[in-house]
Image (cartoon, rainbow, N blue to C red):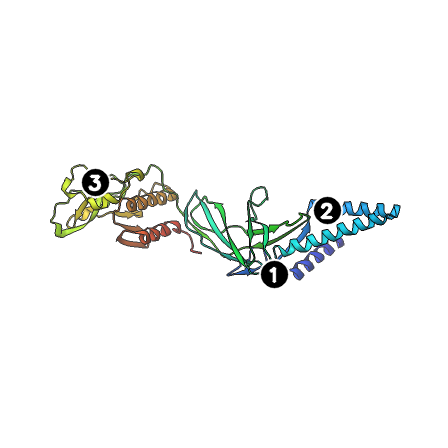
Amino acid sequence: MGQALRGQGVRGWLRRSTGKWLPRRGTLDAGEVVLSQRRVFILPTRAGIGFAVLLFVLLVGSINYTLGLGFALTFLALSCGLVDMVFTYRNLAHLALQPGRVPPVFAGQEAQFELHIANRAGLARYGVWVDFDDVPGGEPRHVTDIPAHGSAAVLLGVPTAARGWLRPARIVLSTRFPLGLFRAWSYWRPAAQALVYPRPEEGAPPLPAGGNADGSGRAASACASNDDFAGVRSYQAGDSPRQLAWRQIARLDPALGGQLVTKHFEGGAGDELVLDFAALPATLDLELRLSRMTRWVLDAEQRALPYAFRLGAVRYDAALGAAHQAACLRALALYGKEAA
């Protein structure tokens, strides 16, 4: 019992004494981070430990046989080891780190976190390994060199499985340059996160017509004057060739799934394309309904069909374009989740 209390006391003392300057595992680093001497750790590698054993053997042999050249070789090798330790530390210390762009992705894709490393010193840095702390196998996958008074950018990929905000594990920067006898490393956890959209449903029903979200409805043919033109919709059997929207058709690439689109006119309210989450069958799984809505948003954008969007309290009027698509996909990604 006494030994356990003493052990807890030692661990508690270490935790209190190092907690003042050692960054906590879950702490986020906002803005730029400079790797000061308190953030850089260094220990000998296996090769370094073997080198130390060799030096000890050389020293013992030189003492036993009073070899002058043996002493010279031993202390020369020791000096090289000490110089390597200093250069390994200097290869990582005082680098400035900043997070870069993190574009949104769909679930199942790889989120790309951009990292900028700036070297404001006159000493070039070589062989700096960068990766996440939880990489399989524990070995970093990305290495970069940073020139003197220069910078480098590294892209770190993280697989995604679920929608919402993705905050990755902390990043580890390490180096063994120049001789590999020592390993210096530092931890960094930037305040960066990736927005993961729901995975688009494969084989989803066609876009709803006439406000029928199950995809089975058919819109009536629009028969109005050109003064009442309201937009375009996908071509349906029976539409007049004179109502084909040739300008929009010319922008669609058939290789990407483009198809004929037809002009429609005001007065046929049933022709308005409305993507309404509440109109989907309630028997479907929540994630499947979100995936179907995601697929419909992408299809409507690809076919240049203005669409209204309804998802709970989120309601957008009929529109088209990158901003409208991003707003709809963001609402789908964060539906039922707290925004970070």
Residue 209 in sight in this render: no
On residue 36, the disc is 1
Kind of residue at disc 3: Tyr
Determine whether, in the image, residue 95 is placed left or right of residue 307: right
Whether the residues at callouts 2 and 3 have beta carbons within 8 Å, the answer is no
Q: Pick whichever, 38 or 68, lies toward us.
A: 68
Mark 2 or mark 1, earlier in chain: 1
Give how far apart the Cα atoms at labels 3 and 1 are. Answer: 63 Å
Determine whether, in the image, residue 186 is placed left or right of residue 83: left
On residue 235, the disc is 3
Position above or below: 45 against 33 = above
Of circles 2 and 3, the one toward us is 2
Q: Pick whichever, 6 or 226, lies toward us.
A: 226
Mark 2 or mark 3, earlier in chain: 2
Residue 220: name its quadrant. top left
Q: Position of residue 237 (x, y in %)?
A: 18, 36
**Residue closest to the far front:** 69
Kind of residue at disc 1: Ser
Say few, some or many: other residues with alpha carbon within 10 Å of mark 1 (under 14 / 14 to 19 / 20 or more): few
SS of the residue under disc 2: helix
SS of the residue under disc 3: loop
Kind of residue at disc 2: Ile
Reading the image, the residue beneath label 2 is 49
On residue 315, the disc is none
